[in-house]
Image: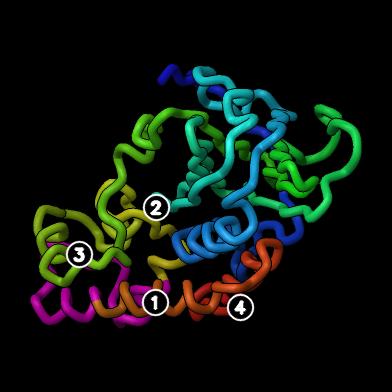
Amino acid sequence: MPCVPGCPAYGAAVRAGPVSAPGGTLVGMPELPEVEALKDFLTENLVGHEIVRVLPVAVSVLKTYDPPVTALEGHEVTAVRRHGKFLDLETGGGPHLVTHLARGGWLQWRDRLPDGPPRPGKGPLALRVALETGAGFDLTEAGTQKRLAVYVVRDPREVPGVARLGPDPLADDFDEERFARLLAGERRQIKGALRDQGLIAGVGNAYSDEILHAARMSPFKRTAALTDEEIAGLYAALRTTLTEAVERSRGVAAGRLKAEKKSGLRVHG
């Protein structure tokens, strides 16, 4: 999969942009629970529908060029999956559209897309996907750090960030024993370990703090110093915190998910 090297992404926020907590910590960055909720929303609204047009408004958001974005057109969306913080739209007989929303990216669903093509350089819009029904969605990005990334690939594992992902912490086979084995090989602060996408997929800054708060554990504690009892408590906090956040986000409209995230946070809320 040829990747476009060094291209900064472009775009801007939608209905609910990034939300700052007291002290300036950005809590709006989509993490596992929000991306899982977006996956559920898109499964309901996209699967079974044909993509008729993909319009890159900011070409720099595209991190691949083969297959071209036009290869998605004419194919039906057959599934929507989540890989860590990545969204993956699978098409029948066509390529995958994989997106990483990064810090300021978001998805805006439209029951009816505007008439006429979007104007490049006018506003935050980075990419538009249109369905045969006239509905579709826009990918946008807020702020000056342009990191929204879109990949058109034959296999999601062609995306470097997906290929490097560790196990999903909500997977059925992610048990306490597996969690303990992952931590056993680490020699760093526990917050850094929780946020490492190559170790555990999907947890970022906000939810690592929420997990540690629930476990009553300092983020500066070294993984090598954890007792069996502390690992058990941390595993329980990890699963409970993420499961509750997913349930809280389920059924919430895409445009309200970032605000919903902030409302449920104990540390950054």
Q: Amino acid at mark 2?
A: Gly
| Image location (x, y in percent) of residue 108 | 72, 52
Residue that mark 2 sits on: 84
Q: Check disc 1 and report its element: helix, strand or loop.
A: helix
Q: Going from the N terminus, do you reach mark 3 or mark 2 first?
A: 2
Residue that mark 3 sits on: 173
Queried whether the magenta region covers residue 60, the answer comes back as no
Q: Nearer the viewer, mark 4 or mark 2?
A: 2
Residue that mark 4 sits on: 263
Residue that mark 1 sits on: 241
Where is residue 131, by image quadrant?
top right
Q: Going from the N terminus, do you reach mark 3 or mark 1 first?
A: 3
Distance between the Cα atoms at labels 3 and 1? Answer: 18 Å
- 35 over 120 or under it: above or below: below
Distance between the Cα atoms at labels 3 and 2? Answer: 15 Å
Residue found at x 26% / y 63%: 190
Dominant secondary-structure state across the stretch colored magenta: helix
> In terms of depth relative to the viewer, which is nearer, 96 or 25?
96
| Image location (x, y in percent) of residue 269 | 57, 76
Q: Going from the N terminus, do you reach mark 4 or mark 3 first?
A: 3
Q: Check disc 4 and report its element: helix, strand or loop.
A: helix
Q: Mark 4 touching mark 1, by CB under 8 A?
A: no
Left or right of 231: which side holds 191?
right
Distance between the Cα atoms at labels 4 and 1? Answer: 14 Å
Distance between the Cα atoms at labels 4 and 2? Answer: 22 Å
Camera sees residue 239 = yes
> In terms of depth relative to the viewer, which is nearer, 213 or 110?
110
> Magenta segment range?
210-235
Q: Which mark is residue 75?
A: none
Q: Residue furthest right?
A: 115
